[in-house]
């Protein structure tokens, strides 16, 4: 059990004050920092097949040293060990936090204990066996026709992870016998537009809800059930069209879903960290058991890295510390995610929940109000589209916005000119990182305009670029299950490390309750 040392607010820690002093001193422009020899080689880390290039971050060795001292002073290693050991670090809910056990339970002597590992393995075998039936086209509906479409009904963590990964891996993994659709929003149009192209006799619904009390998901379930019965499905056959995933199996059974089609997970898995659990069922149906297992392996490889790497070599820790430098010491309130593979278009929404529902907190673990900034506003979208939409503001607006570019080195889209598409994509990714960092000075802009015979004096102010916009680039060799697993786990650990340093609880989400309570009170006319 981690011995609780008295909580020291971050701003009172020596390393924090050192960082404040460094931030207050004149800082070199990124344009100068990028001229340092070997900078790209020195400011890069590799783990579980990923490469983090942080050479375009506005930091130097002194700042990095102070950031690592802050991590040390915040006891991030002890806090991480407490997580892996299954200690009740989700203190306001009195729960352990063991999403890592979902992907690491095949190893011998797991830190969370054999009992949890056995539970995980048995349940995983069950839901993957069912997923494989769907993947192979072995499931049948009430007319005995094979199931060809699976519709996932769930929201938040019961939707965003599997939806994102099914999109991301559609190209890398051999397609199975079913198309998988995701419906999360309770607005009727969301379900209608998905169902209107489907055949009820060939459609399986997967109801996913950690609590099985979420109003939106229950409403979608009732509508789907009505769609089946309106299509002539006898009550006795409805079971063939339903499966469920929840931490409250008794509620799913009470809702009429056959017990053998109910797959559990546990309260020590946060919704936004649940893709590795049976919540991954629709994903496994889309990509198959092998590919899903590779996703777990990639996540477990990143876990092994954070447990073994020194602070100076720890990739997710650096993502966390650079984020804290930008947030708390460079005063940047938002964080932009720019994935360049279009297959990762939904990655931003997935990370928005993971990061903002975890670190959108204003109270320290000891109950005191935070005197510092915590979780940033995370926003973003596919990089190439962003360039032609909102990058104007990132280049020349009054916000300074740190960016995570995400790129893949190898591309597998089966298009004759895919290599040409890929070349343009990577050129733009690299050029944006450089342009945002280096900018173009007024003098250089003036000279350029003059050389072009334009009204340089009048136009220079409008066409110069401040630059000094920091960014990371996270490289994947290719977008496949194991590297996607490593990427997700890297961001999970980043979020954890930031919460550990900010001294906030990352694994509860009390802020979502008041609106829900008011909605149900209003429903009762109160
Ligand atoms: O309202 C937020 C939230 O509780 C998320 O934390 C969760 O992922 C989502 O709603 C869905 O909850 P459930 O899986 O219990 O339906």
Image (cartoon, rainbow, N blue to C red):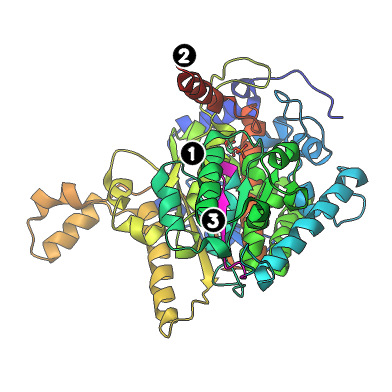
Whole-angstrom CA distance, mark 2 to mark 1, is 45 Å
Q: Residue at x 61, y 54 (%)?
A: 234
Which quarter holds ligand 1?
Answer: top right
User: Which SS class for mark 3?
Assistant: helix
Q: Residue at x 27, y 52 (%)?
A: 441
Residue 399 in sight here: yes
Q: Position of residue 404 (x, y in %)?
A: 49, 52
Q: Is residue 228 left or right of residue 14?
A: left
**Comes first in the chain, label 2 or label 1:** 1
Q: Is mark 2 within 8 Å of ligand 1?
A: no
Which residues fall within the magenta stretch?
145-157
Residue identified by numbered label 3: 164
Q: Residue at x 40, y 80 (%)?
A: 420
User: Which SS class for mark 2?
Assistant: loop
**Comes first in the chain, label 2 or label 3:** 3
Q: Is residue 298 above or below residue 81?
A: below
Q: Is residue 82 above or below residue 293?
A: above
Label 3 Cα neighbours within 10 Å, binned few <14 / some 14-19 / many ≥20: many
Residue 526: which numbered mark, if any?
A: 2
Q: Position of residue 115 (x, y in %)?
A: 91, 44
**Comes first in the chain, label 1 or label 3:** 3
Q: Position of residue 88 (x, y in %)?
A: 79, 30
């Amino acid at each position: 059990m981690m011995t609780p040392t008295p909580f020291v607010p971050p701003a009172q820690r020596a390393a924090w004050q050192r960082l404040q002093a460094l931030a207050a001193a004149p800082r070199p422009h990124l344009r100068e920092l990028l001229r340092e020899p070997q900078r790209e080689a020195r400011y890069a880390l590799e783990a579980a097949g990923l490469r983090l290039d942080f050479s375009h971050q506005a930091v130097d060795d002194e700042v990095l040293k102070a950031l690592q001292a802050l991590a040390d002073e915040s006891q991030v290693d002890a806090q991480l060990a407490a997580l892996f050991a299954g200690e009740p670090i989700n203190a306001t809910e009195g729960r352990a936090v063991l999403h890592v056990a979902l992907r690491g339970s095949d190893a011998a002597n797991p830190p969370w204990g054999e009992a949890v590992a056995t539970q995980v393995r048995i349940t995983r075998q069950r839901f993957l066996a069912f997923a494989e039936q769907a993947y192979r086209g072995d499931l049948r509906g009430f007319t005995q026709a094979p199931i060809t479409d699976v519709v996932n009904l769930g929201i938040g963590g019961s939707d965003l992870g599997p939806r994102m990964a099914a999109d991301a891996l559609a190209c890398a993994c051999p397609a199975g016998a079913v198309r998988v659709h995701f419906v999360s929003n309770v607005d009727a149009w969301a379900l209608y537009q998905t169902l209107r192209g489907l055949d009820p006799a060939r459609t399986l619904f997967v109801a996913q809800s950690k609590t099985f009390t979420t109003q939106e998901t229950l409403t979608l379930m009732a509508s789907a059930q009505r769609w089946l019965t309106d299509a002539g499905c006898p009550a006795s056959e409805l079971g063939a069209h339903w499966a469920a995933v929840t931490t409250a199996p008794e509620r799913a059974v009470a809702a009429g879903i056959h017990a053998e089609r109910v797959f559990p997970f546990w309260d020590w898995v946060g919704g936004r960290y649940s893709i590795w659990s049976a919540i991954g069922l629709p994903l496994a149906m889309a990509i198959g058991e092998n590919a899903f297992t590779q996703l777990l392996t990639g996540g477990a490889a990143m876990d092994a890295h954070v447990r073994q790497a020194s602070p100076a070599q720890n990739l997710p820790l650096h993502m966390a510390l650079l984020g804290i430098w930008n947030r708390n010491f460079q005063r940047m309130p938002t964080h932009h995610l720019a994935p360049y593979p279009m297959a990762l278009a939904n990655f931003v929404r997935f990370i928005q929940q993971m990061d903002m529902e975890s670190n959108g907190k204003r109270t320290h673990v000891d109950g005191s109000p935070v005197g510092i900034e915590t979780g940033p506003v995370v926003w973003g979208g596919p990089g190439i589209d962003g360039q032609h939409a909102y990058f104007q503001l990132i280049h020349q607006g009054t916000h300074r916005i740190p960016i995570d570019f995400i790129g893949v080195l190898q591309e597998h889209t089966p298009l004759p000119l895919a290599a040409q598409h890929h070349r343009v994509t990577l050129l733009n990714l690299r050029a944006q990182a450089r342009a945002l960092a280096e900018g173009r000075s007024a003098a250089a802009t003036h000279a350029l305009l003059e050389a072009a015979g334009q009204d340089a004096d009048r136009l220079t102010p409008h066409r110069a670029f401040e630059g000094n916009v920091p960014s990371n680039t996270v490289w994947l060799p290719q977008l496949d299950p194991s590297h996607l697993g490593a990427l997700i786990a890297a961001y999970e650990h980043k979020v954890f490390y930031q919460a550990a340093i900010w001294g906030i609880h990352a694994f509860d989400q009390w802020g979502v309750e008041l609106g829900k309570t008011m909605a149900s009170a209003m429903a009762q006319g109160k």
